[in-house]
Image: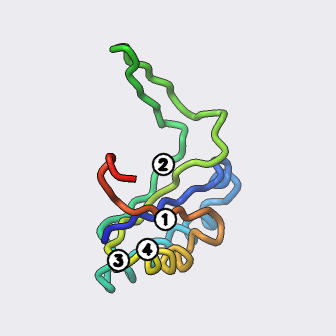
Amino acid sequence: MPYMLLIHEAPDQRAARNEAEGRLLYDSMLRWGDELRRRDLLIGAESLASLDGAARVNTVGGKVRIVDGPFAEVKEMLGGFFLLRVESREQALVLAAECPAAAWATVEVRALAPCFMR
């Protein structure tokens, strides 16, 4: 059963760390991902860049609207994700609590499902 762990972090959090601190946190996430891979639980994982180069795109009434980041109104940004293959929601929750990012960010647990399902 696929579940995604979405890492939500404060948008200014990365800038508050020096490079050495950031590398230590990133390395802890890489090690955790390697452990998940060894346990055959990891489908994929990525870290996302900051909001500076992000863009939001929507099409309303056939008109494309593009808004470049950063986005002043955001309180959190999506910093990365882990896509897991687990047996249950409970297992996904346990893994989310073990995720190193849970110490400095919010880890959202979401099942994968077609968009027509609730």
Provide the secondary structure element on which disc 3 rests: loop
Task: Identify which residue is drawn at 38% across, 18% down.
Answer: 64
Provide the secondary structure element on which disc 1 rests: strand
Q: Which residue is mark 1?
A: 109
Please state which of the two labelled residues, at mark 2 or mark 4, is closer to the viewer.
4
Q: Mark 2 and mark 3: span between their CA atoms?
A: 27 Å
Provide the secondary structure element on which disc 2 rests: loop
Q: Whole-percent x and y of residue 54?
A: 48, 36
Residue type of the residue flagged with mark 4: Arg
Residue density around tag 2, few if under 14, some if 14–19, many if 20 or more, within 10 Å: few
Residue type of the residue flagged with mark 3: Val
Residue type of the residue flagged with mark 2: Ala
Residue density around tag 3, few if under 14, some if 14–19, many if 20 or more, within 10 Å: some
Q: Which residue is mark 3?
A: 86
The answer to whether the residues at label 1 and label 4 have Cβ atoms under 8 Å apart is yes
- Say whether disc 2 or disc 4 marks the residue closer to the N-terminus: 2
Residue density around tag 1, few if under 14, some if 14–19, many if 20 or more, within 10 Å: some
Task: Identify which residue is drawn at 51% across, 67% down.
Answer: 26
* Residue 75 horizontal side relative to residue 28, left or right: right
Please state which of the two labelled residues, at mark 1 or mark 4, is closer to the viewer.
4
Please identify the quarter of the rendering in which residue 74 is found.
top right
Q: Whole-percent x and y of residue 98?
A: 54, 80
Provide the secondary structure element on which disc 4 rests: helix
Give the colouring mode of the picture: rainbow
Q: Which residue is mark 4?
A: 89
Residue type of the residue flagged with mark 1: Val
Q: Which mark is residue 50?
A: none
Please state which of the two labelled residues, at mark 2 or mark 3, is closer to the viewer.
3
- Say whether disc 1 or disc 3 marks the residue closer to the N-terminus: 3
Q: Which residue is mark 2?
A: 49
